[in-house]
Image (cartoon, grey):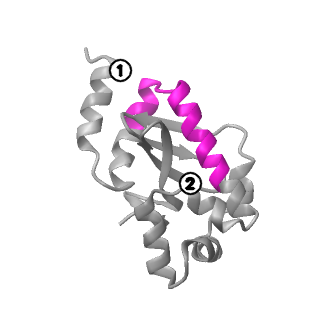
Amino acid sequence: MATVGDVGRRAARWVTAGPSGLVAIAVCLTCAGCGGPDGDDAVHVALQLETALAAGQGPEACALLLPAAAEAVADRTGNSCDGGVVDLVGVSGADPAAAATTTAPRVAVAGRQAQVALSGDTVFLARDGEGWVVTAALCAARADRPYDCEVEAS
């Protein structure tokens, strides 16, 4: 029988560079019960992002993004990340205000990656040194397909 560690190691091998790779491991790790301090820290960063987005605080939101994700926002919107990320909230269908006040977020952690499901958004994160950075946000689930994320590292 596989242990939780074995499941996590196998799941980590399935992960690719984007949030679509986390979909497969999220199901696996949810059943394996992978919470703890790392998961709590990932949730904290996800909630910080949603709070900044709900308040229209682009600089604060962009400071939480992986640099490649911040660059992708700027490229996609033709604006700086600070202004562009706030613009993307309007087209995403996500609800940062609801997400920021989620009382029971669901988190799945696999090695250096995490997925945090909130009331109005799903956020994907990666470990960067000692903390978590957001790799994708303003994500909508799609049946049998990867998440569709407005903010995503390319």
Task: Name the foreground residue: 144 vs 121.
Answer: 121
Give the percent coordinates (x, y) of residue 150.
Answer: 50, 69
* Disc 2 from disc 1: Cα separation: 29 Å
Above or below residue 60? Residue 72 is below
Q: Main secondary structure of the magenta part?
A: helix
Q: Residue 96 at x, y = what percent?
A: 68, 59
The percent position of residue 42, horizontal first and vertical second, equals: 54, 39
Q: Amino acid at mark 1?
A: Val
Residue 102 appears in the figure? yes
11 left or right of 55 in image = left
The quarter of the rendered structure image containing the N terminus is top left
Among all residues in the image, which is located at the extreme front?
129
- In the rendered view, would you say 51 is above or below 91? above
Total numbered circles: 2
Q: Earlier in the sequence, mark 2 or mark 1?
A: 1
Q: Given contact means CB atoms under 8 Å apart, are the residues at marks 2 and 1 in contact?
A: no
Figure check: 77 above or below 65 = below
**Residue 90, picture quadrant:** bottom right
Secondary structure of the residue carrying tag 2 is: loop
Q: Which mark is residue 76?
A: none
Q: Residue at x 47, y 48 (%)?
A: 125
Q: Which residues are magenta?
A: 27-49
Question: Which residue occupies the extreme bottom position in the image?
Answer: 78
Horizontal and vertical percent position of residue 130: 47, 36
Q: Is residue 36 magenta?
A: yes
Name the secondary structure under disc 1: helix
* Residue at which label 2 appears: 64
For this rendering, which residue is in front, 48 or 13? 48
What residue would you read off at disc 1? Answer: 4
Name the quadrant of the C terminus: bottom left
